[in-house]
Structures are given as structure tokens and as C-alpha cells.
Image (cartoon, helix red, strand yellow):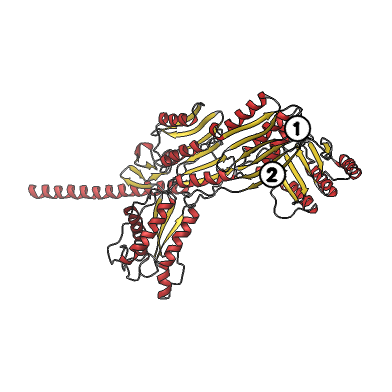
Amino acid sequence: MKLSSLFFVLISFLCGAALSFVAAGFAVTAVEDGSEIAVREVLDTTGHDWAEVEADGLQVILTGTAPTEAARFDAVSQVATQVDAARIINAMEVTPSAGIAAPRFSLEILRNDSGISIIGLLPAATDREELIGRLAEIADPDPVTDLLDIADYPVPPGWEDALAFSAIALDRLPRSKLSVEAGLVRITALSETPEAKAELEQQLSRAAPPGLRIGLDISAPRPVITPFTLRFLIDDKGARFDACSADSEKTRSRILDAAFRAGLSGNEVCTIGLGVPSPNWARAVEVAIGAVAELGAGSVTFADADVTLVAAQETNPAIFDRIVGELETALPDVFALHAVLPEPENRADGGPPEFVATLSPEGLVQLRGRLNSGDLRRAADSYAKARFGTDSVYTATRLVNDLPPDWAVRVLAGLEALSLLSQGAVVVSPETVVVRGVSARENVNARISGLLSDKLGEAETFELDVAYVPPPPPADIPPTPEECEAELVAIQQQSKIQFEPGSATIAEESRGTMDDIAEVLDRCGEIRLEIQGHTDSQGRESMNQQLSQARAQSVLNELRARRVLTASYVAVGYGETTPIATNDTEEGREENRRIEFRLIRPEPIPETQTTLDAVAADPVEDQDGEADAGSPDAPEEGSDNEQN
């Protein structure tokens, strides 16, 4: 009996314990669910839907990634309004903050007669001392002003190429401004003449690496004409200009219209330049040319504001006086008129005194005629030897009296005019200085007119009969890049570069074509050239792209094998993206399968904010550098459609 009672007591105790355990489990679950629901609700209503909630007994575990540290703190604070803060387990993370963007590295370089100034931001890995040393060599003996800052960030792609090209450009441009960025150089510069401008643009385009973009703004300012000279005459050869100067296109048109009304025919050149003595230059020239036309023969010479009107020897004095009076009244203020009516010569001593200097095509000079002193003879002989060479001058002059007091000035001015000719003669007489011959200098008549007007002074006359003969072009001038491109197109029109089917291997029958192309490129020298590969649309687009790249690279390798300088060449495959004919016919597909040679030309660069502009502004966001152009691996033989 006692054992049975004890058994029942034990069973009752175990059943009670089990019921208590089950009841406790239900109670804990109820607490967890209630806590989780309450916390979830408050998080959703406060905008923290990124947070996750998990209840574990009395503990509330928060997980998830908060956008900011402030959002994570606010989420914990909101949960603490629903459950005891001691029960909260904060397992939330915060989105990592973005790293500080790398700055935009750029330089502004200015070179002028005072030296070189450089300002901007330089990567720490760039050798600053080497850069300043290179600029010092270019500016020598002028100083280099270093206003650079340094930032310890990676060197962007294209930065070193841009710096190297900038040094080349500065060396060739004594007056220039360069804006340098990774992969981009913008150049603003001055040149002396339009010819020098064209040559500089060609040199800089050749010198730029293939992957570098360049912007060129090279201007050729108008020349300064001093004295501002114009000479118009009418004689037995007709009406013509020996020299013509204007300050604008409008002025030039007015002057030429007046000359055409006076009998000018043909195309005349009138130089536009700086230095006009009066804004009324066009009006003064118009009335002076009209006066010469009314005289019927003679000349008018402008040297700045001095005007010399010379009539023909047979002009009626009464008509001459009337025309001179009308011209004096019509000329604008500032201009001073000197009118000359030559007297008929009547000498009984065998002719007027003369000094004659001749220049032969071989460069030999003879001085003959009359001089009025030994000092002048020594001066003329020394001047001629200095201009033409000691062994090239022969002097056979004699000394006489009764020569004009300005004879020495006229003789030396004539010799200086003779030095501008390739061959010819100068005749100095008491009334005039005559210059005849040929010259290889452009605008030689204008230069001689300006020289004699300046040296002889007012109211002095001279005659010019100088023809311009252009010098023969040098035989070793390489063709221009545009001419090279045209020759390459012509070669392929005669014999196209062919490849083995589905392969990047150049066909045997195209070896001769490659030899012709290599010969042209060898004459062209260093030009920036893109070798383009193109296919038809047969096959997969990705395979066509790879095949076109491999074929362009194969052509580049063939040129290197023929010892062509290819440092400025780049091979690019365009696949099927640029057809020149339909891909629906075999003939069209054959045209689309091709290699093209195209010049890499400077592209126009829009104005952007520079380092100087950004000094007082907020930091500029990083500007991604250009990605290096990768070349896909060449496909295996026969891997693409055989039609390509």
C-alpha cells in the first residue's frame, strides 16, 4: 500500500511539472510574438522598413543594413519605446560610406617672353622636380614660376602622355597657353604667319600619341606694316599697284574698286595689316587714285600720312595745278600732299650723273657710276660686301663733284633695295631711283616701296619693275597627311587587301599591295593613323568584332615587319557596325569586308572648367579618364563565318 501511494504521488508530480513546462512555453511564445509584432509595427511606421526583427525569449534582436549611422540610432530609439532597452540586441550594420573621390588632375601652363608659369594639381607619383627641370630647359634663360599643388591619388590613365606632349608643344610655341588633363591637351597659341600656323598644326598633330586628344587654336595675327605703304601708278604698261596696304576687308574692297575704275585689270594683292595712320585711309587712297587717273599717267605713293603725287613729264602744268588743288582739298586731315611735275632734261655734258649697281643670277655684284666722296665709296663697297659677300663685289666707281646733297642716302637705299632681289639692277639719278629685276620674295614690290619711301623721304620719286618668281619647291618635302590618306585610298582602289577566309592572315596575293602601302607610309613619316578593320554581317556580331580587330592588327604587324615607323598608328576593329554597302548580296558583303586607313585628326574641344576657374569654387567631382582601348584576341583560323 505504501509503495502504490508513493508511485501515484510521483506520477502526479511529473504531470504537474510537464503542464507547467508547456504553460511556460506558451507564455514565452506569446511574449516573443507580442514583442516582435509591436517592434515591427513601430519600425514600419517610422520608415525603418530596412530593419529585421527576431525575438528570442525576452531579447529582441535587430538586424539589417542602415543607410546611415543616424538611421541605425533612430531605429534603436524607436524600438526602446516598445520594449525595455536592456532587452534590445543591436546587430544592425551601416552602409559603408563612399570613399573620397579622387580630384581632377589638371594643369594650366603659360609661356611668353617672361618665362613659363605652371599652376594646377599634380599626382604625388609624378616627378615634380623632373617636370620643372624640363620646363626650365625650355624657358632658358627665362624663369619658371611653380604654383603646383600635390595630391596623393593614383595617376589617371593618359596623364603621362599628356605631360610628355605638353613639353613638346611648349618647346615649339614661345607664346602659348596649355590646358592639360589626363588624355587631353588644349593648346592656344600665336604664330607669326599663316604658313607658320599650318606648319605648327601639322607638326603637333604628328607628335601627339594616338590615344591623346588634342585641341588646337593657333592664330596668325595681322602683320604690322611700317611704314603703312601704298603705291599706285599708270604708265605705258597700264595701271597697277607696286604696293598696297589696307586695315580691313572693307578698306581693301574700296581701294581695289577705285583702282579698277582707274584702269586696273587682273587680280591684285592688297595686304591687310596693322599700323594704319588714319581711319580715313580708304578715303584718302580713293581720291589720290582718282587724281592719277585724271592725269592719265603718273604715280601716287603713300608712306603713312605722307602722300607724293608724281605726274608724267609731258603733263600740262595748268591741268596738273588744277588736279593738285582739288586733291589737296579732298584729302582728309592728317594727310600731307607733295606734288611733283618733272622738268624736261636738257644737259650738254653727255647725260645725267648716275650710280648703277647690278646683281647677276650667280650672286655677283658690280658697282659703277659716280660718287661724290671717298667716304661714300668706302661705305657703299663695305655695305655691298656685307650684304652679298666679300668675294662677290666688284667696285668701279669714280668721284665727281656737283652731285645732290642726298646722293649718299639714295645710293645706300638703292643697295638695300637690290639686296631684296634675286637678280637685277638699281639706277640712282638726281631725279629718281629705279629698281628692276626679279625676286623670290612675296610682296617684294611692297617691301621695296616701303623701304624707299622711308629712306628717301617726302617728295622723292622712284620706279619699280620687279617681278616675283617663286623659288622651286624642295625635292625632299614629305606629302601632307591628307595627301598620304588619299594615296592609301587610291592603292586599295587598285588592289584591295585580302585575307584568308575566316582568318586574320593576309592573303599571298596582297603582299604586293602591302609593299605599296608601306612605301607610301615611309615617305609620309610620322602621321597619326588609325588602321580600321571591317567585316560583313555574316556570323555572330562578337566574332565579327574580334575578327576585324585581328585583321587590323595583322596589317599593323605587316607594316612593322617592313620597317615602317608605326609609333603613332593604332589598329581598331569595327566589326559589322559600319557597312558601306548592303549585306544582302555577295557583292555588297565583299565591299564591307575591308581595311581602311584614316587620319586621327584633332577634335574640337568644348570649354570646360579649368584648375584656375576652380580655385575659389567647390571641389569638382572626379572626371573619369578614358579607358585604354583594348584589342580582343584574334580568333583561331576558321573560327568565324568563311564569308568574312
Q: Is residue 345 above or below residue 33?
A: above
| Amino acid tagged 2 | Ile
For this rendering, which residue is in front, 411 or 566?
A: 411
In this rendering, does residue 442 appear at all?
no
User: Can residue 501 be seen here?
Assistant: yes
x and y percent of residue 32 in the render?
A: 33, 47
- Chain-order first, disc 1 or disc 2: 2
Task: Tell me how far mark 1 sits from mark 2, CA to CA.
Answer: 24 Å
Q: Measured from the top left, where is residue 588 in percent x and y?
A: 43, 72
Is mark 1 in CB contact (under 8 Å) with mark 2?
no
Q: Disc 1 residue type?
A: Gly
Looking at the image, which is closer to me, 26 or 159?
159
Report the mark closest to the observer, 1 or 2.
1
Instruction: Say what secondary structure mark 2 lies in.
Output: strand
The residue that mark 1 highlights is 457
| Residue occupying the point 61% across, 29% down | 381
Q: Mark 2 = which residue? A: 272
Residue 53: x and y in percent read 36, 47
Report whether 440 appears left or right of 589: right
- Based on the displayed image, in which of its 4 quarters is residue 616 positioned? top right
Q: Of residues 167 and 626, which is closer to you in this image?
A: 167
For mark 1, give the secondary structure: loop
Name which residue lies at 88% across and 43% down.
320
